[in-house]
Amino acid sequence: MQIFVMRHGQAEMVAPADALRPLTENGVEEAKLMGQWLQKNSQAFDCIFVSPYTRAQQTADALISQLSDVANRQTLKIITPEDSAKDVHDYLDAICGAEQYQNILLVSHMPLVSYLVAELTSDHAMPIFQTASVAQIEYDIDKMQGELITLVSPNDIAL
């Protein structure tokens, strides 16, 4: 199974509340670029889980606009910046086993994205995500552990 963990695109610094911060124009372009990269690499997703925060929802919108195959999109309240990586890991093991998902994407925030990669991988690597970066994890649902395959940022891509 493949788990992709994505940080939202670049967001505005000022908003009435952190949850309401929208993407900048650059953030929208970053998300579209990553969508193109995922499409180019033939990634079809059984489900995309998205934080309820505005910037994550807008990142998912821009990303999905570039993809040809997304079976399901769900807003997931447990993937906001301060949520527990262990709780997310437990949720993914349960839902992916029940639904037989093979490829999923989570659109979330720092620091959760770093903690989540560490929680899901056997070497517990905790990478720092640039905006709109995507980590790919080869995940063994039976062992409930995976291996970080790659971490790609918009700056790494030359389409």
Image (cartoon, rainbow, N blue to C red):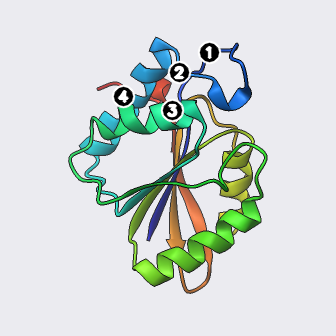
Residue assigned mark 3: 153
Crowd tier of the residue under label 1, counting other residues whose Cα lies within 10 Å: few below 14, some 14–19, many 20 or above = some
- Residue 33's tag is 4
Earlier along the polypeptide chain: callout 3 or callout 1?
Answer: 1
Q: Secondary structure at mark 4?
A: helix
Q: Could you tell me residue 69's position as x and y percent?
A: 23, 53
Q: Is residue 21 left or right of residue 6?
A: right
Residue at position x 70%, y 13% in the image = 14
Crowd tier of the residue under label 4, counting other residues whose Cα lies within 10 Å: few below 14, some 14–19, many 20 or above = many
Q: Could you tell me residue 94's position as x and y percent?
A: 57, 79
Residue assigned mark 1: 12
Crowd tier of the residue under label 2, counting other residues whose Cα lies within 10 Å: few below 14, some 14–19, many 20 or above = many
Q: Is residue 41 left or right of residue 88?
A: left
Q: Could you tell me residue 141's position as x and y percent?
A: 53, 80
Front position among marks 1 and 4: 1
Residue assigned mark 2: 23
Report the amino acid beneath label 1.
Glu
Q: Residue furthest front?
A: 16
CA distance separating discs 3 and 1: 19 Å
Report the amino acid beneath label 3.
Ser
The answer to whether one can see residue 146 in this image is yes
